[in-house]
Image: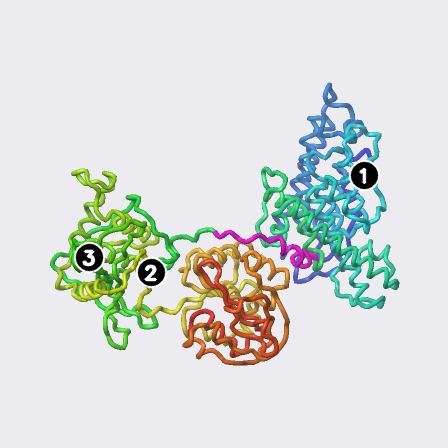
Amino acid sequence: MNPSWDSAELERLLLANTLSPPRCALASCASTAGLLRCSGCKVVHYCSSHHQAAHRRLHKDDCNKIKNSRAKLAAEEQALRARPPDLFLPADVFTSSVGHFWGILDTRDYMRARHAALDALLRIDTGDAVEAALAHGLDMLRLCRSDNLGVRDIIPSLLLRLGREQECYDFIKWWALVFADDLYDWGDMSLPYLDVHNADPFESVTPLLQGHMSLSHASALTLLKVRMYIDISEYEHDEGFPADPSLDRQIGEVVSARVSRHDYAQVVSISARLKDQFTQLCKGVQDKNPYFWETLINDVDIRLPEYYSQGSPEDAALACIHGKRAWEESEDAIRMVEAEVAKYTRQYAPKPVPKSILTMPAHIAEKRRATGAVFPALFRFPLATPQQLFKSMSINASGLHRFVCRNDATQALVYVDGACANNGQQNATGGWAVVQSPGLCRPDAQPDVISARLEDKGPFDVCGVATSNRAELRAAIAALRECNWVEEGFRSLVIATDSTYVVDGATRWCKTWMSNGWKLQTGDTVKNQDLWDLLLGQVEAAHESGLAVVFWKIARELNTVADAAAKAASALPQSIPEFRDTISAVPVERPKVLALILESEQLFNDIHANLISSIGALTTLERVSDPQAALDELARAPLSTVILAADGAITHHQAVREKVLDRLHAGATVILAGQFSNFVNDGQFDRLMSSLGLPWKRGDYSRTNLRLWRSAVGNAALSDKLPPMYSAKAVYLKNVAPSGVWYTSEYDSSQTAVALARVGQGRLGYLGDVNGETHSNQVVLGLCGLL
């Protein structure tokens, strides 16, 4: 660089230094002839003023940032040059103080403006913009050797983007060597600076990794080795014959200059050496920062951190900001890394899903204690009967009925009751019952009742003698835990009981009891505190999910069905030691399906039109094609909703993947089907399985006959609805436990094309068919629980 540097000289050099023939910035044009440079940013070209105007909306913000940063830099430079010298500011600072600018306080505003100009240029992905940013960075290092602003971490990736691989290696090696030299004096301008030239890029990386190489430099060196390996693989492929021009870029300068295409033995030897170095560097980067590879590979919104420490997620984000565009512009580089670093993927630690989407039965939900935040209300219609105010109504396509308010379709009613044989004695046995619906959807037209014998222990491991009061409380708890009323569309639930103890206790007495620490006025402890605690906790949970709970005291003669069922349950011979939720005998509504189609939606529509129709004929199918829409839907869809991951987006959209895995661990069913097996490579699949703690690996890709394993399906009725054998072209899986193997090749039973496994509380399914065979559609329906 010219030691008497100024902005005009910078402008002249930038305009003369271009990466490759520029093209029109309008995506629909991309012409390379007769181009004019944008007069604002000077790093974007157009073939005509018409195309410039058409592109203006997209370019305006970036252009203005570059213009403003350039104007700010010019003003800071002018002010610095005009400032009279003093004790702290030498005369002619741009000449006399080269090398230690930052040590002079008056230069810092100028250096910060210079860095801002560099950052603004990198908002635009053109050769001119990258060249201009590099020129800023190199001159900042000339002015300040110790690089207090960290420009050195940006430069290697810029050199790689410009194809200047040798300079990149020389730059990285110099910094690694000088940081290993504790005696290097940054203030001594007579010492050599950036004087490594034409070093051997094929040499061992061990000395560099053992030194003090930064994370950004280690990442850039890994990318350089990946590019060299991919380049030489082009030579190796055809044993010296001209390679198929499949690369988006030309063979890099290092390989083309230093390796003879015709010396096949040399090519093979160097290729193996580069592969080993690449593996070593991947491990070295992982050791420096365990978050870096995940951050680089995933589609995440990376923001510049305010602070960071070495090895932290913020450190990884900063290194990705420096280098991600270089990785993305190097064909197959990220894919190679995905395959190599899958072994470093940490098993995902799921976060709790919102209580509003938890699906009853409550084997998924927590048994929470009351806080006193919410209490149920009293239903005040003393002269009316349930039959007068509520009618039987179908609430879904499968014919499920509920008792629904005649004047408010969002309010439902259930009848509850408890009974106790030998009440008050040590050999007492209790039972409880909930009448959820009138049973009009059943062949025998009998009411649908959930009932069970009262457990020996309460919900918090408190032993209690069976009593009528205890049984009646248990019935009210079951009304809230055994059905997801919110998912069915209700916003209010009326619990009808003939128990004064339950109604008055829930709506009146409990407020006083809780404020007194669950003590009566006599000082005695409130009886059945554990059940009261859980009942009110369930009321609070219902309130948080949008369901108001109301209690109604009805006459005993209006509660005969629940009463009879509770008495029958109390007479059951088999005791139940621990508190548990009971699986309802009510017909289960088919789950809804949420299809995540975030890539190539049209291809999915073309190939899987029959699958779409089949799902839509059986249940509600919600489709999303945008990551943000997927996040929104995953945040509110009931947990019973089946998630169909129809392409590879789940492997690299981190936010979407984490939401899906949270739901999977909490109890949801997730099916990897559609275009998933087509769009996911080995590395992406391995990383996903590692995060789930599953040993599954991708196996063969072939067409063969698939044979059903009924023992793995487990459900005879479902097995009867699945094709016993059919032909499909599929990506198979290895290392699937026998209990999860639904279909195998008739020639190789060690690999499966259809699998289902338990992950956390949920289930993960996989279908490897790549062509959307008709029989595969039936299998998907089975995996989704729709048959």
From this viewpoint, which residue is outermost toward the top? Answer: 87
What's the residue type where badge 2 is placed?
Asn
Mark 2 = which residue? 484
Q: Is residue 209 above or below residue 51?
A: above
What's the residue type where badge 3 is placed?
Ala
> How far apart are the alpha carbons under marks 3 and 2?
32 Å
- Residue in view at x 81 percent, y 50 percent: 201
Mark 1 = which residue? 194
- In the rendering, at what x and y percent does residue 786 appear? 42, 72
Q: Which SS type dominates the magenta stretch?
A: helix
Q: Is residue 40 visible?
A: no
Assess whether mark 3 and mark 1 are in contact (beta carbons under 8 angstroms).
no
From this viewpoint, which residue is outermost toward the front? Answer: 427
**Magenta segment:** 333-350
Per the rendering, the mark at residue 428 is: 3
> Was residue 775 drawn as part of the magenta stretch in this picture?
no
Task: Name the one closer to the observer, 188 or 283.
Answer: 283
| Colour approach in the figure | rainbow
State the SS at label 2.
loop
Per the rendering, the mark at residue 633 is: none
> Was residue 346 drawn as part of the magenta stretch in this picture?
yes
- In the rendering, at what x and y percent does residue 383 appear? 11, 59
User: Which tag, 3 or 2, sits closer to the chain's start?
Assistant: 3
